[in-house]
Amino acid sequence: MATGDLGLSPGASVTGFPPGVVNGTIHAADAVAAQAKLDLDTAYNDAASRPSTATVPVELGGTTKTPGVYTSPAGTFGITGTVTLDAQGDPNAVFIFKAASTLITASASNVVLVNGARSAEVFWLVGSSATLGTYSVLRGNLMALASITATTGVLVDGRAMARTAAVTLDTTTITRPTGVQQPVATTTRLTSSVNPTVAGQPVTFTAVVTAVTGGAVPTGMVVFSDRRTPIAVASLDGTGHAVFTTSTLAVGRHPMIATYVGTKQFTGSTSPNLVQVVRA
């Protein structure tokens, strides 16, 4: 069961749901998934670029770690038993564990957070693949270059994200990391500067994205599509507007939509169809 969204990009092969349960939205090869993939690439590269503050033995079990960036001489990490992450009273404390090759957790192993540590601020960077042992508990954001395999009964308090290969789950429970605020829902509205128009005449489409609650103005990207085929991408300005102008629409009826891809702070949304008529 996953509490939060599930996404895949590129590709569209999401299997096992149902019987698996997603208490969120499944994004398979859509604009939201594509943006999430880009965000993962950015986060992975950022974590990889952080200089190490300590080199520690491969085995993390039975130890207590304070905030920092950790590497191991062998380029791999393992957890047998319990590793304790101590934020020392700082709720913004960041823990990064960089494994050049693998992360392997033993059965019934556990990551414990104390003194204000939050799973949202814990990052596990894996240069190849991660394997989580049966009934183990991992807290934090797991980012693997290749694959992630969660065996029977694993609990992930955070995220499981693979860049180039599969995430395989087996009666796994994944919950949104502690400290991550629920994104605000949005609505998207699409208007046209002139309708109908004639072939070759410029027409401007304006998407307006609004937060359903609160006064914050959404940021990010809007995809404009004609008959569900993307034809342009534009950024929202400071008022929540994105604009696209074209003079190349063929004669006929064009069902146009605008899709806001969303950010960490705002959920994505899609406008109702706007039928743009182009006359000869």
Image (cartoon, grey):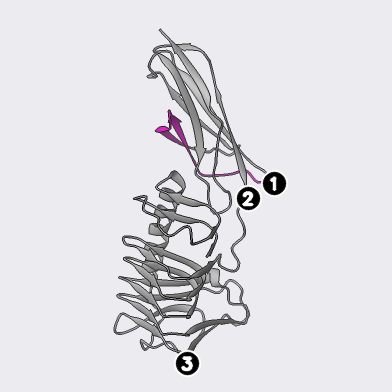
Mark 2 touching mark 1, by CB under 8 A? Answer: yes
Q: Is residue 147 visible?
A: yes
Q: Is residue 53 left or right of residue 270?
A: left
Residue at the image point whose x is 48% and y is 24% from the top: 255
> What residue sits right under mark 1 in the picture?
213
x, y (%) of residue 21?
A: 52, 60
Q: How far apart are labels 2 and 1 at the CA level? A: 7 Å
x, y (%) of residue 3?
A: 56, 62
Badge 1: how crowded within 10 Å, few (<14), some, or many (20+)? few
> Tag 3's secondary structure?
loop
> What residue sits right under mark 3 in the picture?
62
Residue at the image point whose x is 33% and y is 80% from the top: 76
The reply to whether the magenta stretch includes residue 223 is yes
Q: Is residue 231 visible?
A: no
Badge 2: how crowded within 10 Å, few (<14), some, or many (20+)? some
> What residue sits right under mark 2 in the picture?
184
Residue closest to the eye, 56 or 125: 125
Mark 1 touching mark 3, by CB under 8 A? Answer: no
Amino acid type, mark 3 = Gly
x, y (%) of residue 236?
A: 53, 38
Mark with earlier residue (2, 1): 2
Amino acid type, mark 1 = Thr
Residue at the image point whose x is 38% and y is 51% from the top: 9
The reply to whether the magenta stretch includes residue 142 is no
The residue most toward the front is 19
x, y (%) of residue 89?
A: 63, 80
| Span colored in magenta | 216-234
Q: Is residue 34 left or right of residue 91?
A: left
